[in-house]
C-alpha cells in the first residue's frame, strides 16, 4: 500500500520516471487487465464509459483546485474539509453526469485566468465570467473532450499494462522504463490513434441513435409486411 501511495504521488508533479515506474506494481495478469481496459477506453471510452475517466478527474480537480479557491474566497480555515467534500461530490458527479466535471475542469482555470487579468482588487469580477464562459465552452465540446481524455487515459493504461504483462519475459521492458520519454511517446501514439478513431471514424451518439431507430423501423416494417403477406395467403387459400 505504501508503494502504491508513493507511486501515485509521482503524478502530482512532473516526474516521468515515477509515472512509468507504476507498471512494476502490476502483476502480469494485472498488466493484461490494464491492457484490455486501455484498449476499450481507446476505442469506446468517449461515451458512457467516459464516466470511468470523469470520476477520477473530478476527484483530481477537487484536490488540486478547490483548496486555493477556498482560501481565495475566505474559507482557508475550512479548506481541508471543503477539499474532501468537493472531491467526493465531483467524483460522484463524474459517475452520474460527466458534463458537471467537464464544466468545472474547464471553468476553474478559465476563471483563474480571468481573475489574473483584471487584477487582485477586482479578482472576483474576472473569475466569475471566466468560470462560466470556460465551463460553457467545455460542455459544448463535451463529446470532443470525452474522446480526447478517454483516449489519453486508455493509451496510458494500455502502455503500462503491456509493459507489466511483458516484463517477466522481455528484458527490454526494463530498458524502456529507463527512457520515460520513449514510453510517453508510445502512449501518445496510442492516444492519437484512439482519439482519431473516436472523433472521425466512430459514429456520433446522435448518428448511432438515428441508425438504431432506423433499424427498428425497418424491422417493424418487414414484420408488418410479412404479416400482411400471410393474411393474403390465408385469404387466397380460403377463397379456393
Image (cartoon, rainbow, N blue to C red):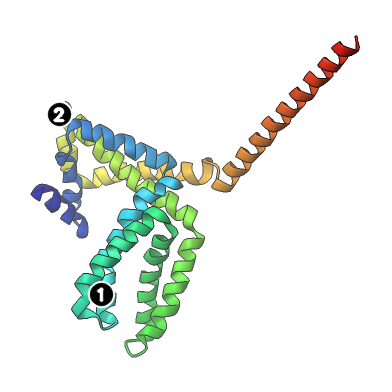
Circle 1 crowding by C-alpha within 10 Å: few under 14, some 14–19, many from 20: some
Left or right placement of residue 143 versus residue 234 in this view: left
Disc 2 is placed on an element classified as: loop
Whole-percent x and y of residue 13?
Answer: 20, 60
Residue at 29% from the left image edge and 42% from the top image edge:
157
Q: Is residue 76 above or below residue 213?
A: below
Residue at 37% from the left image edge and 56% from the top image edge:
94
Left or right placement of residue 74 versus residue 108 in this view: left
In terms of image quadrants, where is residue 212? top right
Q: Is residue 1 above or below residue 35?
A: below
Query: Where's the C terminus, which quadrant?
Result: top right
In terms of image quadrants, where is residue 9? bottom left
- Which of marks 2 and 1 precedes in the sequence? 1
Whole-percent x and y of residue 149?
Answer: 38, 52
Circle 2 crowding by C-alpha within 10 Å: few under 14, some 14–19, many from 20: few
Whole-percent x and y of residue 175?
Answer: 15, 37
Can residue 93 be seen here? yes
Residue at 63% from the left image edge and 43% from the top image edge:
210
Q: Is residue 126 above or below residue 102?
A: below
Q: Is residue 33 above or below residue 11?
A: above
The numbered mark at residue 68 is: 1
Closer to the camera in the image, 135 or 219 = 219
Residue extending furthest bottom? 121
Residue at 27% from the left image edge and 34% from the top image edge:
33
Reading the image, the residue beneath label 2 is: 168
Disc 1 is placed on an element classified as: helix
Amino acid at each position: 500500500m505504501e508503494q502504491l501511495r508513493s507511486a501515485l504521488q509521482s503524478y502530482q508533479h512532473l516526474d516521468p520516471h515515477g509515472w512509468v515506474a507504476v507498471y512494476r506494481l502490476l502483476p502480469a495478469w494485472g498488466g493484461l487487465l490494464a491492457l484490455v481496459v486501455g484498449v476499450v477506453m481507446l476505442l469506446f471510452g468517449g461515451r458512457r464509459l467516459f464516466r470511468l475517466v470523469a470520476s477520477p478527474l473530478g476527484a483530481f480537480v477537487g484536490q488540486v483546485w478547490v483548496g486555493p479557491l477556498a482560501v481565495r474566497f475566505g474559507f482557508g480555515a475550512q479548506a481541508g474539509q471543503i477539499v474532501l467534500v468537493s472531491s467526493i461530490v465531483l467524483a460522484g458527479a463524474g459517475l452520474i453526469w460527466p458534463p458537471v466535471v467537464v464544466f468545472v475542469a474547464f471553468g476553474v482555470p478559465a476563471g483563474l485566468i480571468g481573475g489574473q487579468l483584471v487584477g487582485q482588487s477586482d479578482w472576483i469580477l474576472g473569475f466569475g465570467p471566466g468560470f462560466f464562459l470556460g465551463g460553457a465552452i467545455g460542455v459544448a465540446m463535451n463529446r470532443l473532450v470525452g474522446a480526447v481524455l478517454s483516449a489519453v487515459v486508455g493509451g496510458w493504461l494500455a502502455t503500462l499494462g503491456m509493459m507489466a504483462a511483458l516484463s517477466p519475459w522481455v528484458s527490454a521492458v526494463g530498458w524502456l522504463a529507463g527512457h520515460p520519454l520513449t514510453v510517453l511517446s508510445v502512449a501518445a501514439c496510442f492516444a492519437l490513434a484512439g482519439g482519431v478513431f473516436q472523433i472521425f471514424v466512430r459514429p456520433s451518439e446522435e448518428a448511432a441513435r438515428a441508425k438504431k431507430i432506423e433499424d427498428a423501423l425497418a424491422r417493424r416494417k418487414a414484420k408488418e409486411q410479412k404479416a400482411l403477406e400471410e393474411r393474403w395467403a390465408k385469404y387466397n387459400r380460403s377463397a379456393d
